[in-house]
Structure formats: C-alpha cells, structure tokens
Amino acid sequence: MKVQALEVRTAGGLEETFKAIVKERPGALLVMADRLFLYNRQRIMDFATKQHVPGVHAHSELVEAGGFMSFGPSYPSMHRRAAYFDRRTFIASMIGAVLSAPLAIEAQQAGKVPRIGFLFYGSPGPSPEGQNIAIEVQFANGRVGQLPELAAKLVRLKLDVIVTPGTPASMAAKQATSTIPIVFAGVADAVGAGLVGNFARPGGNMTGLTSISAELGGKRLELLKEVVPKASRVAVLYNPADRSNVLVLKELQESAPALGLTLQVLQLRGPGEFEGAFAAMTRARAHALFGAAGVLTTEHRKTLVDLAAKSRIPAMWGERQFVEAGGLLSYAVNFYDQLRRAAIYVDKILKGAKPGDLPVEQPTTFDFVINLKTAKALGLTIPQSLLLRADEVIQ
C-alpha cells in the first residue's frame, strides 16, 4: 500500500490539497483528527463525494457531513461539555489545574508551597485547588470599582505571584503593589494601558501576554465590511469605565474613515442601558455593529447577542465567546490560550526570574470565527473568500 501524506496548515490550503488529490487519484482518503478539518468538514466531504473517493475520518462529524466512515471521538460533543462551564468557571479551574502542573516538582524540591493570587473581574466559579500550590482567588462580580480593594487584599497576603486576566484587573494590581510579581493575560494594550514601558523589557514587577486587541480595529472593520459591503454607518458598543474598551474605541475611530465608515458610539455602563443602545442604533439606521469585549459586555454576552439578533444587525464581536453564544463574527486572540500560557511566566518567576526581564508575549495568530447559522438567520451570504480564511465556521 502506498501512502501519500498531504500537509494542510490553513483553510485556504485545502484548495491546493484538493488539486493534489485529483492529480494523484488515490483509492481512499484518510482525514486525521484536527479542528481545521472538523470546521471545514462540509467542504472536504463535498470534494470527496464529487471525486468518488471513499474516506476514513477521525471525527464522526465528517460522516454526518457525508463521509464514508469514521473511528474516533466526537469533538463537538466534548467541546459542548467543556462549554457547559462558563468563562468564570473555566478560569477558576484552569488556574488551579494549569498552574499546579508545571510547578509541582519545583515546589517539592524547594520545600515551600508557592502562594499565587488570582484577580478577576467576573463572578465566582469553583474554587481551584492544587496539592503543591496555594491559590488565593478574588472575584469582582463584574464591578470594576471593587478591583482596587480586592487587589489590596491580595497584596496583604504577601503572595509570590499575582495573576490578572484582562486590563481592569491588571491595572488594579499594578496600583496595589510595585513589589509582588504580576503576570497578566488578555490585556488589550499593555503599553497603552501603562502596565509596562515596552514589550521587550517591561521593567518593574509586571509581565505577561497582551492580546493587542486595541490594534485590531482596522482589521475588524474591514472584515465586517466584507460581510456587509454597503455598510457606511457602524454602531460601536463600549464601556467607558473599561480601559481596554477605551483603547479599542480609539483604534476604531482612527481606522473607520479610510474604510468609508461613520461610527455611532454608544456607551454602556450597565445592563440597564443595553436595550436603549440597540434602540438608538435602530433609530440611526446603523448597518452593522461592533461590540467590544470587556468587563461588562463579556459577562452579558448572551443578552447582547440576542439583542443584536432581535434588531437584525450584523455584528463583529471582540471575542469568540460572543460567536459561540450566537453572534455573527469575531476576530481576536484566543483568551483561554493566553491564560494557559500565563502559567509559563509564573513558573519562570517562581524559579527566580524577574518579571521586568521577561518580554511581554505578543500574539502572532488570531482566531477569525464565523457563525453561519446566524448569517442565514440575518439573510446574509458570507463570501467564499471569507469562509476560506476563517479559523472556525460554526454551522
């Protein structure tokens, strides 16, 4: 039996792979387990059917899309079980699980149990625990004003490291201490927010991972306009109390004119203002919407997504969680991946590294997610060129 391995790195690379298969005319096709193939399963199955090539697939979902046979786990079912836990639950559990793993041996060798603080703006989930690590958790329940007090409480515990997902929590921690090492993740603009002096040598007691979300405004509006080509007025939902939202808005305002767009800026300070904001964009006849992710909006993403659907307005969101909740589009760094990678910084710091000497990690890839079900409900046809560029297409 002759086996020909074809490497595919992106959705766009599938077309070249299809051409190679047609040229070689194989007797069968084996599709390995990978989310790229899972998300593009209908394209792959349509091609295999057209070429009369029987296939064996690692995911049962490819058979449901028209494939011949499969042997392997159901990826989406596992994902749905994981998605049962909301964002706060995921963060609480991941901090315990991820941080415990790399530090266990080191902690035993040092004869000391590391104490790590965790400051988050969301609501409490299950308390994370580790056998060789002590974790102190403080949640602000979506109230940014509580973060300084909670940060001060963590500082009084004399912790070894404080982990701060998101810009608001990171800023509160910075104001609370200049000595305890702080590792941030998912920060929109670490330099613009004043957390570090520069990415290469941050200095001080802070380092971590930036999402550079504030720099993605132009790309997000460009993708949104590809979906709604006739759009000229775009509503923007943002929370003025959230520093990350302010930075994101600034970039959007700088990018909009070049794309021929006028922005309708709508401030959200609480859930009570949601319906009024959507009523305002309807009156102004906005053609599309951008919703910034942050303290307020992420906590209430399902409500916002439902209001966008009710208003029948195409929306680009600041995080993929909005699209998973039924939103149309998102283009952003994977927040959960950044949180996992924060454990690497914590490990280095506990081994003696100074946070100011550890470069801030900037993302090189971003997830572009499209919800086709939502597009169909809105009567939109997503261009094939966009579908090819998407990292995930939710059916």
Image: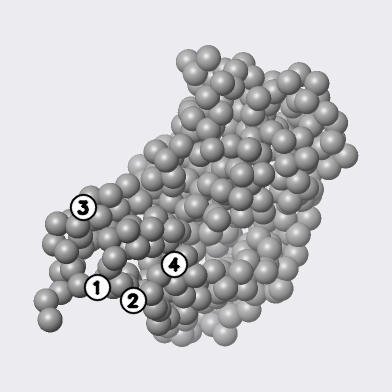
Specify the amino acid type for callout 2: Val
Which of the two labelled residues, at mark 2 and mark 3, occupies the earlier sequence position? 3
Q: Which residue is mark 3?
A: 19
Which of the two labelled residues, at mark 1 and mark 4, occupies the earlier sequence position? 1
Q: Residue at x 63, y 79 (%)?
A: 129
Q: Out of 181 and 169, give the one closest to the viewer.
A: 169
Instruction: Answer with left or right where residue 350 lies relative to residue 88.
Output: left
Q: Which residue is mark 4?
A: 66
Specify the amino acid type for callout 4: Gly
Q: Which residue is mark 1?
A: 28
Which of the two labelled residues, at mark 1 and mark 2, occupies the earlier sequence position? 1
Percent x, y for residue 35? 42, 63
Q: CA distance from mark 2 to mark 3?
A: 19 Å
SS state under label 4:
loop
Mark in the foreground, 4 or 3: 4
**Farthest-out residue, left:** 2
Q: Which residue is mark 2?
A: 56
